[in-house]
Image (cartoon, rainbow, N blue to C red):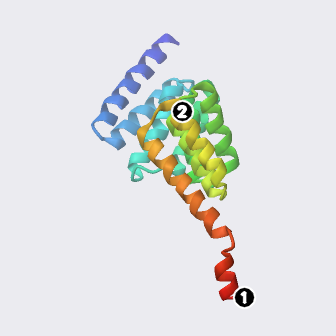
């Protein structure tokens, strides 16, 4: 009903105000009240997932998974929702395959979404795929112009040069130490 939606929106607004003040428990209670009144309110589900993270030291946490999964189910065309769920899948559930799916979904929706690009970089690094990480970071820099990303791209390229030199046999050392 429209009355339930109005109440849900009022609770969501309360939650946003508490969130901005860093009052995590109050924000969480307000967002939960919002989805109780309107279970289809994807933004409130997202907010529940996001408020769980500061409660857990600003890191993705298990408590954020189900609300983020629900908001993606309700609104699969929201890049923020996909990226947040991808972070939880990667860092908490250690499921880089599903995390990659959500980061890529976020990038299909918003090709300039730096956090989704960085999520792919993390996945490639976790897999030991330095070329993949460099490619993902290059895509991030090209899409966003991010100066921090540019510096990180150079760091990845330096790692690759170092790894390449270390992998090459040194003929002089080989002759001295057969």
Select label 2 or label 1 by which is in front. 1
Q: Disc 2 and disc 1: Cα gap in Å?
A: 46 Å
User: Which residue is denoted by mark 1 in the rendering?
Assistant: 178
Locate residue 23, reporting x and y percent. 30, 41
Secondary structure state at the residue bearing disc 1: loop
Front residue of 118 and 71: 118
The numbered mark at residue 142 is 2
Is 149 displayed left or right of 74 in the figure? left
Secondary structure state at the residue bearing disc 2: helix
Locate residue 69, reporting x and y percent. 61, 38
Furthest residue toward bottom: 177
Question: Could you classify mark 2 by the number of other residues whose Cα lies within 10 Å: few (under 14), some (14-19), or many (20 or more)?
Answer: few
The numbered mark at residue 138 is none
Q: Is residue 84 above or below residue 127?
A: above
> What is the quadrant of residue 16 in the picture?
top left
Furthest residue toward top: 2
Residue for point 49% across, 53% down: 155
């Amino acid at each position: 009903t429209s009355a339930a939606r109005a109440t849900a929106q009022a609770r969501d607004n309360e939650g946003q105000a508490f969130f901005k003040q860093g009052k995590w428990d109050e924000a969480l209670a307000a967002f939960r009240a919002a989805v109780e009144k309107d279970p289809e309110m994807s933004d409130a589900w997202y907010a529940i997932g996001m408020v769980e993270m500061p409660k857990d030291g600003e890191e993705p946490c298990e408590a954020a998974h189900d609300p983020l999964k629900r908001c993606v189910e309700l609104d699969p065309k929201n890049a923020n929702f996909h990226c947040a769920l991808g972070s939880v899948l990667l860092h908490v559930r250690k499921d880089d395959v599903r995390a990659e799916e959500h980061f890529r979904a976020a990038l299909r929706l918003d090709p300039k979404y730096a956090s989704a690009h960085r999520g792919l970089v993390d996945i490639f690094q976790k897999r030991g795929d330095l070329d993949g990480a460099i490619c993902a970071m290059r895509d991030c820099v090209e899409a966003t112009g991010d100066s921090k990303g540019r510096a990180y791209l150079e760091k990845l390229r330096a790692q690759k040069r170092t790894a390449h030199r270390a992998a090459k046999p040194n003929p002089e050392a080989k002759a001295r130490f057969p």
